Image (tube, helix red, strand yellow):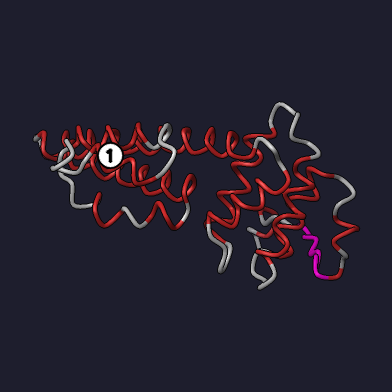
């Protein structure tokens, strides 16, 4: 009882989004995109709803923070969405935004850069802890592979991911860096083979 004065007392507001129509949630674009995602994220109709959600986002695409907002949307859908692939998101964006490929490419480049940085940091930490260069290279390799997988999925969907079994066994960090950089510029995933296939190098 003596400690009761230190206990926080507050109420929380529980909002059941399923009780609201999608039209009602769309009234403010920025808030509406988030609310619609929260409403449909675990539903089977998320793939069908994505174009409408992206259309709403596109009304705010000229705002300074629109690209980072889109990145947050993609991250949330990729991590929590059920039965929705990066290709579904890519198609939904392209359906409403003429510059969709360019925007996705910008986000993919940023994620590739972040993946490489995380790999370098992870490798440096392991290298310092173990006092050996091998730990740093292993971490860098893992970061590059993570970035390559994400870049392939964002740029080319399932077609790009089919190259992963060929790329994953590569130990040469220099080759992986070349593939990592090339994802941004090649037109088709098959073009990446010239950067790592032994008989084409």
Towards the viewer: 39 or 46: 46
Magenta segment, principal secondary structure? Answer: loop
- At horizontal 73% and vertical 61% (from top left) the residue drawn is 49
- At horizontal 75% and vertical 50% (from top left) the residue drawn is 33
- 81 left or right, relative to 145: right
Answer few, some or many: residues within 10 Å of disc 1's Cα (few below 14, many 20 plus, some between 14 and 19): many
Quarter of the image where the C terminus is located: top left
The verdict on residue 14 being magenta is yes
The verdict on residue 105 being magenta is no
Q: Position of residue 156 (x, y in %)?
A: 46, 49
Q: Which residue is mark 1?
A: 122
Q: Position of residue 71 (x, y in %)?
A: 59, 41
Q: Position of residue 177 (x, y in %)?
A: 27, 33
- At horizontal 58% and vertical 34% (from top left) the residue drawn is 102
Secondary element under disc 1, as helix, strand or loop, is helix
Towards the viewer: 81 or 92: 92
Instruction: From this view, report whether residue 77 is shown above or below residue 100.
Output: below
- 34 left or right, relative to 22: left
Q: In the displayed orientation, state which residue is furthest to the bottom.
A: 44
Q: In the displayed orientation, state which residue is furthest to the front.
A: 200
Q: Position of residue 62 (x, y in %)?
A: 75, 29
Q: In the displayed orientation, state which residue is furthest to the top.
A: 64
Instruction: From this view, report whether residue 33 is shown above or below residue 45.
Output: above
**Residue numbers of the magenta segment:** 10-18
- 65 left or right, relative to 195: right
- 49 left or right, relative to 86: right
């Amino acid at each position: 009882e003596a400690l009761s004065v230190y206990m926080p007392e507050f109420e929380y507001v529980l909002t059941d989004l399923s009780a609201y129509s999608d039209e009602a949630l769309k009234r403010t674009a920025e808030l509406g995109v988030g609310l619609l995602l929260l409403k449909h994220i675990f539903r089977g109709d998320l793939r069908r709803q994505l174009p409408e959600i992206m259309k709403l986002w596109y009304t705010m695409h000229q705002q300074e923070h629109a690209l980072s907002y889109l990145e947050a949307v993609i991250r949330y859908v990729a991590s929590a969405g059920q039965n929705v692939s990066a290709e579904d998101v890519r198609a939904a964006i392209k359906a409403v935004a003429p510059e969709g490929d360019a925007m996705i490419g910008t986000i993919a480049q940023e994620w590739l850069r972040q993946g490489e940085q995380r790999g370098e940091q992870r490798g440096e930490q392991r290298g310092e802890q173990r006092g050996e260069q091998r730990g740093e290279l292993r971490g860098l390799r893992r970061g590059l592979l993570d970035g390559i997988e994400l870049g392939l999925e964002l740029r080319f969907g399932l077609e790009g991911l089919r190259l992963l079994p060929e790329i994953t066994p590569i130990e040469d960090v220099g080759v992986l860096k070349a593939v990592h950089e090339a994802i941004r510029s090649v037109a088709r995933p098959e073009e990446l083979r010239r950067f790592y296939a032994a008989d084409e190098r």
